[in-house]
């Protein structure tokens, strides 16, 4: 095969053939992990005071499962491409495949651990805040704006829920320092500077440095590209951590559901379910 880039027609035919090979490899791989479940909370629907909680839970549980399952699909895709790349010797072909198929998925997948952790924090903060209505007769809706929801918000809202602490500990493991180091701080550098490339290419040739005395210098060097096999290994670990967090999230929700149902029974207020009609004043 020539060292020159392929003519457009030949290139397209070759890329399609390679994509077929990739699909066969991906179909042969074991799933990267269990699928996040859906509809595990569907029978718990309320009206009145807990209508907001009910609708939020319905959406958040679905979207978190979507995020986790999208993550798992991307990990499996990258694993299949890593396997195929190990069989290809032609650098030009690898480069074309990287541009067309691999790099876009890699960028999304490496960012997803941070995205998923943030979505857990967002959901947990909101749901704990709504569920806290049963904790006080003078509940005040003093929740921060969505753009200001961070771990501190979840800590404040989740303080009275026993299973929140375990969820927090599981979330703190996602996208930790080791993951940042193994991916050359990809998330921050990609979104704010120039990140490491995937498989091919160097980056960060010149860096501005400031020592502990405030002295400024400029360093000449490089950031090596991330290798697919390393990316896949790291993402598999992150997917497992995210699934563990989802299990903790479910346990927290179960605690809240049980508490809300007990509060409704004890207070004698209307209890809505998915099959109830909304009551009207007589």
Image (spheres, rainbow, N blue to C red):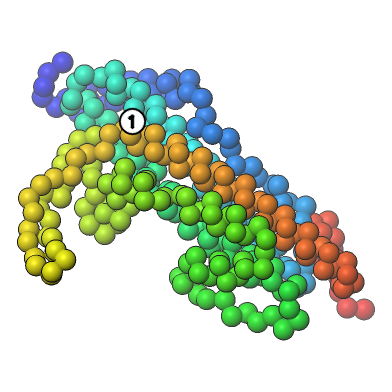
**Residue 65, percent from left and from top:** 58, 47
**Residue 225, percent from left and from top:** 22, 39
Asked whether the viewer can see residue 104, the reply is: no
Is residue 113 positioned above or below 55 on the image? Answer: above
Asked whether the viewer can see residue 222, the reply is: yes
Kindly identify the residue that appears in the image at 82 percent across and 62 percent down.
261
Q: Secondary structure at mark 1?
A: helix
Kindly identify the residue that appears in the image at 53 percent across and 60 percent down.
121
Residue extending farthest top = 1
Quadrant of res 222: top left
Q: Quadrant of the C terminus?
A: bottom right
Describe residue 101's horizontal placement relative to residue 260 as left or right. left
**Residue 156, percent from left and from top:** 57, 71
| Total marks in image | 1
Give whichever of 234, 269 is nearer the camera.
234
Residue extending farthest bottom = 138
Kindly identify the residue that appears in the image at 35 percent across and 23 percent down.
83
Q: Quadrant of the N terminus?
A: top left
Kindly identify the residue that appears in the image at 52 percent across and 76 percent down.
144
Describe residue 281's horizontal placement relative to residue 207 as left or right. right
Quadrant of res 202: top left
Is residue 97 positioned above or below 274 on the image? Answer: above
Residue extending farthest front = 213
**Residue 50, percent from left and from top:** 74, 69
Describe residue 77's horizontal placement relative to residue 217 as left or right. right
Residue where numbered disc 1 is placed? 229
Give whichever of 112, 166 is nearer the camera.
166
Give whichever of 67, 257 is nearer the camera.
257
**Neighbour class for label 1 at 10 Å: few (<14), some, many (≥20)?**
some
């Amino acid at each position: 095969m020539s060292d020159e880039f392929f003519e457009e027609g030949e290139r397209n035919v070759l890329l399609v053939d390679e994509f077929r090979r990739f699909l066969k490899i991906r179909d042969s791989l074991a799933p990267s992990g269990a699928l996040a479940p859906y509809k595990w909370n569907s029978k718990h629907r309320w009206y009145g005071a807990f209508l907001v909680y009910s609708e939020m839970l319905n959406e958040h549980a679905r979207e978190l499962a979507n995020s986790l399952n999208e993550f798992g699909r991307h990990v499996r895709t990258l694993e299949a491409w890593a396997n195929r790349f190990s069989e290809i010797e032609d650098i030009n072909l690898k480069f074309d495949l990287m541009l067309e198929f691999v790099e876009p998925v890699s960028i999304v997948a490496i960012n997803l651990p941070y995205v998923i952790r943030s979505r857990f924090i967002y959901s947990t903060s909101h749901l704990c805040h709504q569920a806290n209505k049963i904790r006080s007769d003078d509940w005040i809706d003093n929740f921060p704006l969505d753009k200001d929801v961070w771990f501190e918000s979840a800590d404040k809202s989740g303080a009275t829920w026993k299973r929140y602490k375990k969820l927090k500990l599981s979330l703190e493991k996602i996208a930790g320092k080791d993951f940042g180091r193994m991916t050359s701080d990809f998330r921050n550098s990609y979104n704010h500077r120039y990140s490491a490339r995937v498989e091919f290419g160097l980056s960060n040739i010149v860096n501005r440095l400031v020592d502990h005395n405030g002295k400024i210098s400029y360093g000449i060097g490089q950031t090596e590209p991330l290798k697919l096999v390393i990316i896949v290994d790291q993402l598999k670990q992150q997917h497992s951590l995210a699934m563990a967090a989802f299990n903790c999230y479910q346990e927290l929700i179960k605690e809240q559901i049980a508490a809300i149902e007990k509060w409704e029974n004890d207070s004698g207020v209307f209890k809505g379910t998915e099959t109830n009609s909304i009551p009207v004043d007589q």
